[in-house]
Image: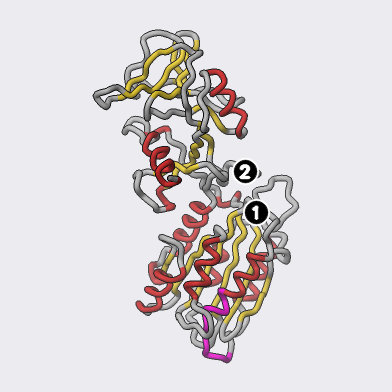
Amino acid sequence: MLWTVLLLVLAITTPTQSQLVTDRSCGNDMSRLWLDIVFVVDNSKNMNMYRVFDTISSLFSPYVQIGTGYDDPRSTRVGFITYNWNATDVADFYKLQSYSDLSNQIQQLSTTPLSRRDESYIDTGLAAAIRMVNATQGLRDNYKKVVVFFTSQYNYYNTYPEDQAKLLKSWGATLITVNTGGDDNTQENLHDKIASKGMAFMMADGNTTLELQRALLATNCFCRPDWYQYHYPLKSTDIFSNYGVCVYRPAVAMNRISAQNYCHSMTDTSYLGSDPTHAFYNGLTSFNGSWWWDQPNGMPMWPLSPYSGAAPQRAGCVADMKYSDGTYSWTPISCTNLFRFLCESVACDTDNYCEF
């Protein structure tokens, strides 16, 4: 039933070609990431370390807020784990509290010799990542957790890595893998058993930094609990197809003003949206003889595009009506009618911090 509702909500917001230009994209400001990131680096004797720490360093600019305690809550905590036959917590989420701390830690790791052991057990690295992420439960729960693996081998000693990866994913963590070698079997295992969908990369591709930045920005674009994220194409499960728009479908019918007030009260960035499944209020508002789309409190309304379709012929309230022939139409109605409605909101991303 939940998936039915989700598909319905997404289906009703599928844009026309003319509307695509106004759909909000996810934020892309790397200096305002707000994530908790664990870098897990294989440092066994045979590990290919080429450009590993250069890549990590290039993800962050001096303007990023590392650690906590900033006036702007959009900050990122960074942890480091190394592993070979066992794992070492180099830095937990509380150690690095500035960009300088982060740079110094990366520099120190980049000059540390590899282990003399040639064993590389990825399950030990995963176990350490699980402990580090688990230790943060109850703190910064609205911040997404990301685990980034750098390795050129896939071996395990005691625990099935895919089971550990599933546990982290069940907590909402995103798992990213970077294969620093060229072994196809290693890449297949990392892709199939460890990485989240679309998050298995290879250093040999030559654009790892951009791929990781894109992955982090996509992870840092999400919706509050009980809201659904708009994506296109409709049936895509690719996180990179998400838009910076969230939708919520209340289980009540209201008149136009009550529906608008309800949506505005949900978040600072929510407003009355549109749902043409049967007969639903949409966000069209008549003002001074022109039609406008509803926006959050304090933000200017958007004018109705002349390419969006024929505007209603008389002022008042508007509903999306489904007719017996299966077509939909914007139909003027009395503002006192009780209809279902859909709320929309800006997604939680680098431009919009969400507390929940």
Q: Secondary structure at mark 2?
A: loop
For the N terminus, the image quarter is top left
Amino acid on which the number 2 mark rests in the picture: Cys
As for residue 87 lying within the magenta part, the answer is no
For the C terminus, the image quarter is top right
Amino acid on which the number 1 mark rests in the picture: Asp
Task: Give the magenta part as a residue range.
Answer: 116-126
As for residue 122 lying within the magenta part, the answer is yes
The answer to whether residue 63 is visible is no
Q: Which of the 4 image quadrants contains residue 261?
A: top right
Q: Which residue is mark 1?
A: 141
- How many marks the image carries: the answer is 2
Q: Nearer the viewer, mark 1 or mark 2?
A: 1
Closer to the camera in the image, 113 or 186: 186
Q: Secondary structure at mark 1?
A: loop
- Label 2 Cα neighbours within 10 Å, binned few <14 / some 14-19 / many ≥20: many
The picture places residue 276, in percent across and down from the top left corner, at 38, 28
The picture places residue 189, in percent across and down from the top left corner, at 40, 75
The picture places residue 155, in percent across and down from the top left corner, at 47, 83
Name the N-terminal-most of marks 1 and 2. 1
For the point 49% across and 52% down, the residue is: 218
Q: Which residue is mark 2?
A: 354
